[in-house]
Image (cartoon, rainbow, N blue to C red):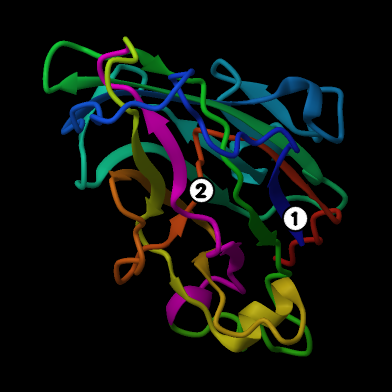
Amino acid sequence: MNTFKLAQTAVAVLALSAGAAHAVPSPSVTQWSIVDVAVFDPASVLPAGNTFPNPVLSNGNTELRWGNTAPTSQSGLIIDNTGSPFTVNTGILASTISITHDNFPIPPGNSLTSVDINGLLTLTSVAPPPNGPTVGPVLLPFQVSFLETPNNGTGGVCADGGTPFAAGINVNGCSDIFVIDVESLNFPFFYDSDGLGVGDPVLYFLSIFADGFGTLSDAACTSVLGAGNNGCRGFQTAELLSTTAVFKLLITETPFETPEPGSLALMGLGMASLGWIGRRRKQKQG
């Protein structure tokens, strides 16, 4: 099992004002300008060397591939950043970065064992005018556990309890599994929209959602997290295919309580310094 994990430098509450409290709150922000950028940290990639069959970085440290030099014998992770500022309305989901997992067979002994993703998110209020101060970079904690499975399963059974090369997600062999820490949402921060300390800063909450996430089978949860972890949430990636998770940002003035169907609230991809640390990638079969 591999694990995405924030370095131990998370900000508990971000405040942009100091001094005595004021009786009148700052105007509530209804619209934000967001910049969200994430890259792989070259110093964190293991095995090191940046030469095939070990993991190789490219495209401004947003693409990481391992396996043979031939593209047909590689697996990989690709970050797609929004790049330019985008607008987020308070209370409305807005798409941000995406990460694609290319799930293809690789030769025995070739693996990615760990990598950090360094992300920066900044936000500025744009409505009501005038524009407020810029917040960021913001660091937020969340955890994603990843299991690379053998294509033929174990004893003819996939890690999710399914049958290898049967219909559905395991049609091309046993799928790989991502599990998300569902306890991570509603990161609180205070924001003084006028930037002058005239009014009390207003409390807001940041959450991130990912399309395609849902409740996994008990077998999948046990395979990734161990016994007693039924009901976990995440997604599976089919063999011989590329699977993309698109992340969406939500800013609210009250805590978000219930994840939307098919989505998962999690903290801060694109806003966190993450570590993907775990066992050596299992040998692919076929």
Horizontal side, residue 220 vs residue 276: left or right: left
Q: Residue 243's x, y, as percent?
A: 45, 53
Q: Which residues are magenta?
A: 168-195
Is 176 contained in the magenta span?
A: yes
User: 23 or 84, which is in the foreground?
Assistant: 23
Mark 2 residue type? Met
Q: Residue at x 72, y 87 (%)?
A: 228
Mark toward the viewer: 1 or 2: 2
Residue behind mark 2? 267
Of mark 1 and mark 2, the one earlier in the sequence is 1
User: 124 or 27, which is in the foreground?
Assistant: 27
Mark 1 residue type? Asn
Give yes or no for contact between labels 1 and 2 (Cβ–Cβ under 8 Å). Answer: no
Q: Residue at x 77, y 79 (%)?
A: 226
Q: Residue at x 40, y 48 (%)?
A: 207
- The label number, if any, that marks residue 2 in the structure image: 1
Q: Residue at x 75, y 55 (%)?
A: 2
Q: Residues within 10 Å of mark 2 (few under 14, many from 20)?
A: many
Instruction: Please determine whether, in this image, residue 142 is positioned above or below residue 39.
Output: below
User: Quadrant of residue 260 in the image?
Assistant: bottom left
Instruction: Please determine whether, in this image, residue 137 is positioned above or below residue 248.
Output: above
Q: Is residue 147 visible?
A: yes
